[in-house]
Structure formats: C-alpha cells, structure tokens
Amino acid sequence: MEERLFNIIIQELCSEMNIKMERLSYNWVFQLSKNGKIRHITRNHFDINPQATGDIANDKYATYEVLKSQDVPVIEHTMIFNPARRNQYIPEDGIWPIVISELEKHKCLVVKPNNGCEGQGVCLCHTLKEVETAIENIFQNEASASICPYYNIKTEYRTFYLNGKIHFIYGKQKPCVIGDGKLSLGELIDNLNLPTKKVVEDNLHMLDLTYIPKVQEKVNISWKYNLSGGAIPVLVEKDELYYKMEELAIKAGKAMNINFATIDIIQTVDGNFYVMEINSGVCGTIFAKTVDNGYNIIKDIYRKALQALFQE
C-alpha cells in the first residue's frame, strides 16, 4: 500500500526537527518524543486541541450551536435523530413534522450525516421524497442527521487556523468539464483523473455519462466543493476578501476554543459570509498534490503545529 502523504510529511518533519516518532496501535497512533515531552497524532488529529473541543468540531450540529451562541455567522442546522438509536430525543409526533416544516420554509434542503466528512452521504433535496430517502440512508449507519437550508454559494473557502492566526486560505472551484461536441460526459470526466474516492463515485451516479455536451458547454460534475470529489484548490491572495474571511475564521476559532483546525467558510452570491464547518483533523494532502508549491505550504503548517506541540 502506498504510504499516505500525510505520514511522509510528518516523518520528514520529525527527522528535521529531531523528534523521535514511533508508530503504535497498528500505525493509527504516532507517538512523538522530544526533550522529555510526549505528544500524539491520530490520523490527522494533533493533540493540541482540548478533547471537548475536538468532539464538538466533529459534530456539525454542536458546532452550529456553539458558534450561534456567540454570534458567529454560521449556516443553520437542524438535528434529526434516528428513532432506532436516539429515541429519547424524538418528539411525540416524530421527526417528520420537523422535516416537513424545514422543507416548506426553505424549499430546498441539504441533508448530511451529523458526523460525516469529505461530502459523503451529503444530498441536495428538493422534494419530501428526496429528503426521506437521504435521511433513511444516513440512518442505516448513523444515530443522527443534520439538515440545512440550501445556500446559493458563490465560492467555498478553507482557512488554516493555528493558535489564533490564519496562515493561509484557499478557495475551491467545483469540478467541471467543457464540452467539445464529440466526447461523452463520461469520456470527458475520465480525462480529469478524479480522486478514487467514494464521494466521486456517488457524484457520478447522479449524471448521465452518455450525454455529449455541446461545444464550450460547461457541465458541473457536482454541486459540492469537496477536493475529494475533484474540486480544484486556488490560493487566495491577501486582499479585502482574504481579510474578511480571516476575521470571521479567527472569531470562530476563538469561540470554539480550538487551537489547530481548518475552518470552512462560504461566500453566498449576495455577498454574505458564513462558517460552514470546523475540522479538528487538519487535512491538506490533496492541496499538497494539486497546487504549485502546495507540498511546502502544507509541510510548513504542520511544522508550525509540531512546534506548538513542543512549544518551540
């Protein structure tokens, strides 16, 4: 199996920074030692964040409530519990009146696993039947789902937050193809070499891959902005837009009491900014592979995180 790029970067940094690294628990735990201090990394989670904060960040609805309580602009969430696993939280009349009310109010809903990642299981729903199907699919494996109004997003951004500062921001361009009037949608998509991820497979199931787009016709592969689904990262220069997102991300990071995270922000077509989610696991490997100098940019933020772990 090919070594994960994240593991390679951490190994390089440990060698450069004279940090002893041991792999424990079938390589799930990286145990780092230096100057009598021992620190840990699990997957892409550094033990620089409080346990409770990490738990909140991994729960979309909890993150929403924490940010909302401190007046941080954040996209709305409504929690829907699985009756088979969280029956004590189900209203007497069940979950569906809540769902119907949200759909009538917003006309279009995004349904997602409350603890999901990489856009997996996230569905855009226009009808009650679509919402029902999305929730029932999530409930096969999860104790809860989160439903959100659909926001008309201009661009989605990812900010890299460490100890009260934003170190860089990139925007995400939705994956798309441009027709030539000859090749089918499936053939055009094959030329993109999309990541071999389940979210890509799910996205492709929604398309007619036999369709032949007209010359210069743009076809979005997905309405989502996940890099794991083929979206393209583009670094944001330090301009007015950057500073607006920086201000919001720092406010969100402090509200969450988090130390190291990626904070995802959307800009809507009407110019408003909202926090979408906060990730306590800091992943940048696709960025590292696809952006000029991306490897060094990601390596530098991980270097700063390791310095913070050992307070260098």
Image (cartoon, rainbow, N blue to C red):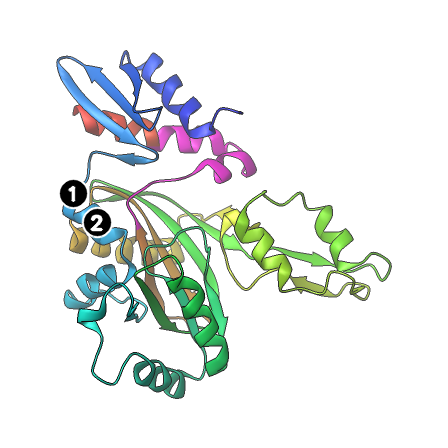
Type of residue at label 1?
Gln
Say whether residue 297 is magenta: yes
Coordinates of residue 253 in the picture (x, y in percent): 22, 51
**Residue stretch rendered in magenta on the structure:** 279-301
Residue at 32% x, 41% y is 281
Coordinates of residue 106 in the picture (x, y in percent): 40, 83
Residue at 46% x, 82% y is 128
Q: Is residue 125 above or below residue 226?
A: below
Type of residue at label 2?
Asp
Q: Looking at the magenta stretch, what is its main secondary structure?
A: helix
Which numbered tag is attached to residue 311? Answer: none
Coordinates of residue 211 in the picture (x, y in percent): 78, 65
Residue assigned mark 2: 55
Q: Is residue 269 above or below residue 225?
A: below
164 displayed left or right of 12 = left
Label 2: how many Cα within 10 Å (few below 14, some 14–19, many 20+): some
Residue 209 found in image quarter: bottom right
Residue assigned mark 1: 51
189 displayed left or right of 24 = right
Residue 297 shows in this picture: yes
Residue at 35% x, 24% y is 26
Coordinates of residue 308 in the picture (x, y in percent): 20, 29
Residue 232 shows in this picture: no
**Callout 1 secondary element:** helix
Q: Is residue 26 above or below residue 15?
A: below
165 displayed left or right of 5 = left
Q: CA distance from mark 1 to mark 2?
A: 6 Å
Q: Nearer the viewer, residue 172 or 277?
A: 277
Say whether residue 111 is magenta: no
Residue at 16% x, 56% y is 255
View extreme (right): residue: 182
Label 1: how many Cα within 10 Å (few below 14, some 14–19, many 20+): few
